[in-house]
Image (cartoon, grey):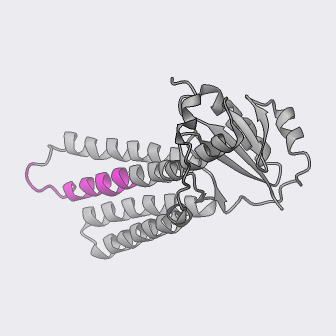
Amino acid sequence: MTMRVQLLTSEWCAPCRDAEEVWRAVAGRRDIAFEVLDVAQPEGRSIVSRLGVRTIPSTVIDGALSHIGVPSPSEAAALVAAAPERSAGPATEHYVGMSLEATSAWSVASAVCYLALAGAALVFGGGLDGDPPWRTAALHVYGMGFVAFVVLGLGEHLLPRFTGAPIRGGASAWWQFGLVHAATLLIAAGALAGARSVEAAGGGAGLGAFALFAWRLLPVLRARPQTNPDAAATNAFPGP
């Protein structure tokens, strides 16, 4: 049975980010199921209530409170020494932590670039007056490049944290990232050149990206909220 490591964190807890970095490094070497749980969310509150946790970051291993505070790399490795070495290949599903995953960070960066590109086209191209051939292309760059990347990039980070549920990652996340880029460039190029077939190909790429995002979210959408009669347990932690 895979060893389960749960790190209890909160948005206002600065040391929690350090603890997450240590455990993510260990999870890359050891075959463990690593979860980052916010104490403000149902699953985190349930563990806080059951174990009487009063300090974060705290590490729970196989249901038992095993460490309080930020572990050193050697301490974390010792806690999971019984776990086997991780085989090649990333896990299919993972729990989202406090820091942005690489695909989320690159999606937000891409959104900013497309927003700047669309804005520059409108500003230096004379705005929206008239009907220049590039206007439709610029609007597509904004709509698909900026809006889609913001929704998908932040959605894959925030939705799992709200529910405490895992999301599919790995190659599927990068395929989604690439398909949105392809959709943006093909639709914009097709609109600029008046090539409907190119626009249609871009639309197909965009549809594929959205379908892939929906498939990745299935574990999140299927997660059942846990009821916790002692919801006030989180009041044990101080505010910012």
Tell me which residue sits at (66%, 45%) in the image.
Answer: 47
Looking at this view, is 163 or 78 the one in front? Answer: 163
Q: Residue furthest left?
A: 130
Quick check: is 214 in the magenta stretch?
no
Looking at this view, is 216 or 166 the one in front? Answer: 166
Does 56 appear above or below 97? above
Q: Give the percent coordinates (x, y) of residue 239.
A: 51, 24
Q: Is residue 119 left or right of residue 12?
A: left
Looking at this view, is 140 or 105 the one in front? Answer: 105
Tell me which residue sits at (35%, 50%) in the image.
Answer: 146
Tell me which residue sits at (54%, 62%) in the image.
Answer: 224
Q: Is residue 21 left or right of residue 86?
A: left
The stretch of residues the image draws in magenta is 129-148
Q: Give the percent coordinates (x, y) of residue 177.
A: 50, 57
Q: Give the percent coordinates (x, y) of residue 240.
A: 51, 23
Does 12 appear above or below 164? above
Quadrant for the N terminus in the image: bottom right
Q: Is residue 88 left or right of residue 210?
A: right
Q: Residue furthest right?
A: 82
Q: Give the percent coordinates (x, y) of residue 214.
A: 47, 67
Quick check: is 130 in the magenta stretch?
yes
Does 20 appear above or below 187? above
Q: Is residue 82 left or right of residue 6?
A: right
Tell me which residue sits at (37%, 53%) in the image.
Answer: 145
Quadrant position of residue 68: top right
State whether the magenta stretch is mostly helix, strand or loop.
Answer: helix
Picture mark count: 0
Q: Residue furthest front?
A: 229
